[in-house]
Image (tube, grey):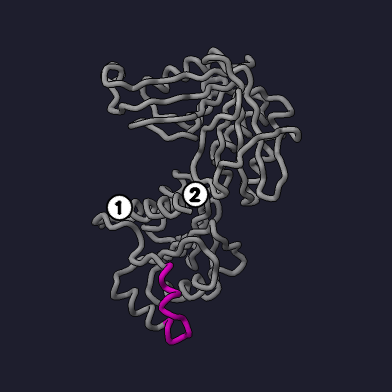
């Protein structure tokens, strides 16, 4: 979520109008899921994708016509086999896409600035997009964010009935309330991946994890490895005095993903010992089962119990037969995505 909010915030900060395409609903096999967004700005600026192909081209054509003009429309796409063949696509489902023109006015700038700040502070809540429509034409689009603490970002008079929505909403929901439709989605940070160790696997993991929306922090005790020139995709790179205090000064919480990829077993054990004392939502450590068992036995002698190791993913990553640093990074990031999706 932070990625598209940041893109909108940047465009509005430069006082540039934009059009946002939002997948409201999808059935069957479609390129992207509900909640996926793409932003189309002036001068050909584009952020995000709703799946590419002919559908995206049609949406972009509509968006360019709407740029700088008030209004919003909903476009429906029925990807039957006949249409799919014509579009040279392999999908066969249905899509409903909102195409909404967003003006660079003070109200919108304040809304997205506040939403971005909320995400940066790792606050949670629900974002509600209200659609007042007539046939296929949307007359009005209103947005508000209901914070977990009860506060509201947006129109203070915004009222909505969401009693039927689960408290822990994990995926967007499109529902109807009287004469309006409500698109409700969870507001949450994408999570921060802490990479302990700055070797080859760590470098590839940083690149992939950043591309799927995670924030990246790299930590190592070797300046020649842990530097911004090497880890240009990282949000932060820290050079440690040693791994003995690797987690010192870090804000570790349920949206933290601790990935232990140091250059040796002793360093891995040192970091894992500290990681087990945190509320991190994910802890993963590279290495064989033999190495893992040896580290666990050593930590048991230091007071840890077998149940403490149940939350550790080791060997780290999904079992896909990965061999190279790039392949191992794919397996790790795939596991991170899965861990994030089930929270």
Q: Main secondary structure of the magenta part?
A: helix
Residue 89 appears left or right of 163:
left
Q: Nearer the viewer, residue 228 or 2?
A: 2
Check the picture and name the quadrant holding the N terminus.
top right
Q: Nearer the viewer, mark 2 or mark 1?
A: 2
Q: CA distance from mark 2 to mark 1?
A: 19 Å
Q: List the single residue furthest toward the bottom.
A: 301
Residues marked 2 and 1 touching at CB (< 8 Å): no
Instruction: Report which residue position mark 1 lands on.
Output: 327
- What residue do we see at 54% from left, 18% from top? 73
Residue 104 appears left or right of 60:
right
Residue 178 appears left or right of 62:
right
Q: List the single residue furthest toward the top.
A: 65
Element under disc 1: helix
Task: Please identify the quarter of the rendering in which residue 261 is found.
Answer: bottom left
Q: Nearer the viewer, residue 333 or 43?
A: 333
Residue 116 is situated, as x and y percent measured from the top left of the image, at: 64, 41
- What residue do we see at 49% from left, 56% from top? 193
- Neighbourhood count class around disc 1 (C-alpha, 10 Å): few under 14, some 14–19, many 20 upward: some
Numbered range of the magenta stretch: 299-311
- What residue do we see at 41% from left, 30% from top? 26
- Neighbourhood count class around disc 2 (C-alpha, 10 Å): few under 14, some 14–19, many 20 upward: many
Mark before the other along the chain sequence, 2 or 1: 2
Residue 74 is situated, as x and y percent measured from the top left of the image, at: 51, 20
Say if 340 sits above or below 178 in the image: below
Element under disc 2: loop
Which label sits on residue 284? none
Instruction: Report which residue position mark 2 lands on.
Output: 214
In magenta segment, residue 304:
yes
Say if 247 sits above or below 154 in the image: below
């Amino acid at each position: 979520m932070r990625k598209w909010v940041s893109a909108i915030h940047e465009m509005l900060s430069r006082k540039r109008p934009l059009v946002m395409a939002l997948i409201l609903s999808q059935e069957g096999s479609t390129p992207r899921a509900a909640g996926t967004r793409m932003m189309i700005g002036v001068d050909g600026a584009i952020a995000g994708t709703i799946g590419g192909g002919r559908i995206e081209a049609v949406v972009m054509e509509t968006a360019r016509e709407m740029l700088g003009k008030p209004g919003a429309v909903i476009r429906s796409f029925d990807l039957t086999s006949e249409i799919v063949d014509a579009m040279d696509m392999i999908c066969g489902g249905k899509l409903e896409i909102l195409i909404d023109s967003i003006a660079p006015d003070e109200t919108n700038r304040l809304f997205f600035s506040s939403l971005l700040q909320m995400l940066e502070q790792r606050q949670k809540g629900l974002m509600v997009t209200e659609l007042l429509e007539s046939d296929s034409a949307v007359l009005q689009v209103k947005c508000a964010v209901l914070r977990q603490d009860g506060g509201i970002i947006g129109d203070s008079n915004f009222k909505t009935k969401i009693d039927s929505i689960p408290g822990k909403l994990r995926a967007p929901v499109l529902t109807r309330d009287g004469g309006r439709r409500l698109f409700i989605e969870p507001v949450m940070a994408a999570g921060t991946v802490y990479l302990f160790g700055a070797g080859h696997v760590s470098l590839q993991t940083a690149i992939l994890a950043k591309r799927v929306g995670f924030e990246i922090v790299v930590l190592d005790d070797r300046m020649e490895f842990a530097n911004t020139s090497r880890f240009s995709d990282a949000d932060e790179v820290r050079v440690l005095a040693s791994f003995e205090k690797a987690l010192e000064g870090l804000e570790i919480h349920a949206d933290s993903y601790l990935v232990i990829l140091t250059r040796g077993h002793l360093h891995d054990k040192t970091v894992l010992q500290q990681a087990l004392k945190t509320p991190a939502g994910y802890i993963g450590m590279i290495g064989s089962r033999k190495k893992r068992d040896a580290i666990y036995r050593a930590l048991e002698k230091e007071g840890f119990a077998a149940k403490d190791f149940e939350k550790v993913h080791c060997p780290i990553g999904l079992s896909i037969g990965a061999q190279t640093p790039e392949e191992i990074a794919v397996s790790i990031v795939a596991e991170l995505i899965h861990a994030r999706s089930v929270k």
